[in-house]
Image (cartoon, grey):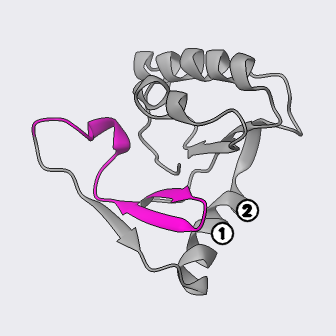
Amino acid sequence: VVDRYLDSSIFYRYLRFASESVSVTVITQEPRSNSADFNGFLDASRLFAAERGSSTYRLLYEQSFHDRWIKCGDDLYHLGGSIRHAGAQSPFTLSKIAPTDSNFDVFNSVTAAAQEVFGPANPNHP
């Protein structure tokens, strides 16, 4: 999941359904200030990390991306808005993107540029 504006709902609304054998990577931006929303996100991320461990859960920060993406296996989706707004009263767009090399290159470039906060290289969640 790549989304700048995540909150704690990502964990209990979506990621809790992922099988323990599935690797989950969440990429968001590091907050510029100490916000209650982001602190709640970090608390939920710590719980998820404690349940999953650093071998199947990674949290990364990346500051320069704008688009929101979800990659599930070989499927790639573009979100019209933040996933935290999915299911709200307003319309929400989820578009499946063609699995072309160029589309995966864009997605993978965000992952490659991101800083790992929790994961195999950093097994202690901040």
Q: Are marks 1 and 2 in contact (CB under 8 Å)?
A: yes
Q: Callout 1, which amino acid?
A: Ser
Quarter of image, res 109:
bottom right
Asked which secondary structure carries label 1, the reply is helix
Query: Nearest the camera: 94 or 34?
Result: 94
Q: Which residue is mark 2?
A: 112
How packed is label 2: few (under 14 Cα within 10 Å), some, or many (20 or more)?
A: few
Query: Nearest the camera: 55 or 67?
Result: 55
Identified at 73% across, 17% down, the residue is 50
Q: Callout 2, which amino acid?
A: Ala
How packed is label 1: few (under 14 Cα within 10 Å), some, or many (20 or more)?
A: few
Q: Where residue 113 sits in the image (x, y, percent)?
A: 70, 60
Q: Which mark is residue 61?
A: none
Query: Nearest the camera: 77 or 41?
Result: 77
Q: Which mark is residue 109?
A: 1
- Residue 31 seen from this side: no
Asked which secondary structure carries label 2, the reply is helix
Q: Where residue 68 sits in the image (x, y, percent)?
A: 42, 56
Residue span colored magenta: 69-89
Identified at 66% across, 18% down, the residue is 46
Quarter of image, res 86:
top left
**Residue 84 belongs to magenta span:** yes
Question: Quarter of the image containing the C terminus?
Answer: top right
Direction from residue 30 to residue 112 in the image, left or right? right
Identified at 44% across, 80% down, the residue is 98
Find the distance from the CA under tag 1 to the CA under tag 2. 5 Å
**Residue 90 belongs to magenta span:** no
> Would you place residue 20 above or below residue 113 in this image?
above
Direction from residue 113 to residue 97 in the image, left or right? left
Q: Where residue 1 sits in the image (x, y, percent)?
A: 53, 49
Identified at 54% across, 43% down, the residue is 29
Q: Where residue 21 sits in the image (x, y, percent)?
A: 73, 39
